[in-house]
Amino acid sequence: MNLVGVNICKNEINNLIEDIERNFPDVDVQAKEYYRVIAKQILFFKHIFNTYPHTYPAKVIISDFFNFLLDDINESTRYLYLNERSIIENYIRLILKDDAHTTHITFQAFDDLKNRNTLILSDAEYGKIKNEYRIACSYIHGGHKLTNHLVDNFEDCLNGISTISQRSKRSRINQTLDLFKILNKLFIHNNREVVDNSFHRNKEALKYLLGKQYSAFF
């Protein structure tokens, strides 16, 4: 059963990558490996959602990851950060499981995230979450310097130029991969029963999708 589950996941991901190659032949090897990781994130949450179909934030995260992947392919930077922000917010909702954060994620939500996970969340990891969220929000709401003339501001917006958009792709990929690892750890720590039920008799698939490091939780 375990190997069957892993093979199903591998086939799903290979089919997705092949479809990306057909539709976007210019995608390079580095990007395709990145998309494999995102595909694993999608399959992980599909397992969660299939077992708990009323978990709305999990449904939203699945959609966000699909759009995040497509935005990266199309280099739609603003929409990519919009989806990244939504991914972070819905992870926080699933981690905190607090009605107070159902509609809006505030600074209090980040404080609660830190205070409730002091045993497994380091200051550096917490800083990475907040920094990625800050970058996403800055890009969405406009990271452009407005000290120049209006024409300059307009041209910057038109060309998508800002300090944030000039992050190298490799750097951005590494940052988001680190972010996903941290958020996955927090999600599993706070939802052990949910994850255990979603991957019942299929822990090898869980290891394949997120990594062996999460075996310690079960």
Image (spheres, rainbow, N blue to C red):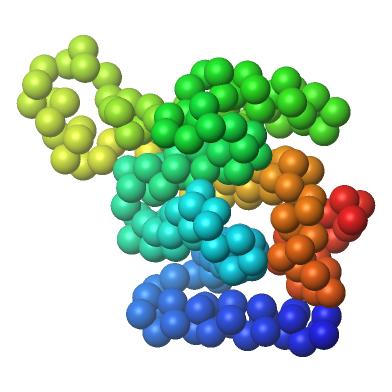
Tell me the residue at 17%/16% (across/down): 148
What x and y, as percent, mark residue 71? 37, 57
In the displayed structure, 197 sits above or below 98; it is below
Give the residue displayed 51% in from the left and 49% down from the top.
57
Question: Residue 190 at what x, y percent from top left?
Answer: 74, 41
Q: Identify the image quadrant of residue 86.
A: top left
Q: Is residue 134 left or right of residue 47?
A: left
Residue 117 image point, x, y percent: 76, 29
The answer to whether one can see residue 34 in this image is: no
In the visual, does 130 lie left or right of 191? left
- Left-right relation of 210 to 53: right
- Identify the residue shown where x is 39% and y is 59%: 67
Task: Determine if residue 173 is in view.
Answer: yes
Residue at 80% x, 70% y is: 200
- Which one is nearer the viewer's eye here, 115 or 34? 115
- Number of marks in picture: 0
Q: Quadrant of the C terminus?
A: bottom right
Q: Is residue 35 above or below residue 185?
A: below
The picture quadrant where one finds residue 137 is top left
Q: Position of residue 19 (x, y in %)?
A: 44, 82
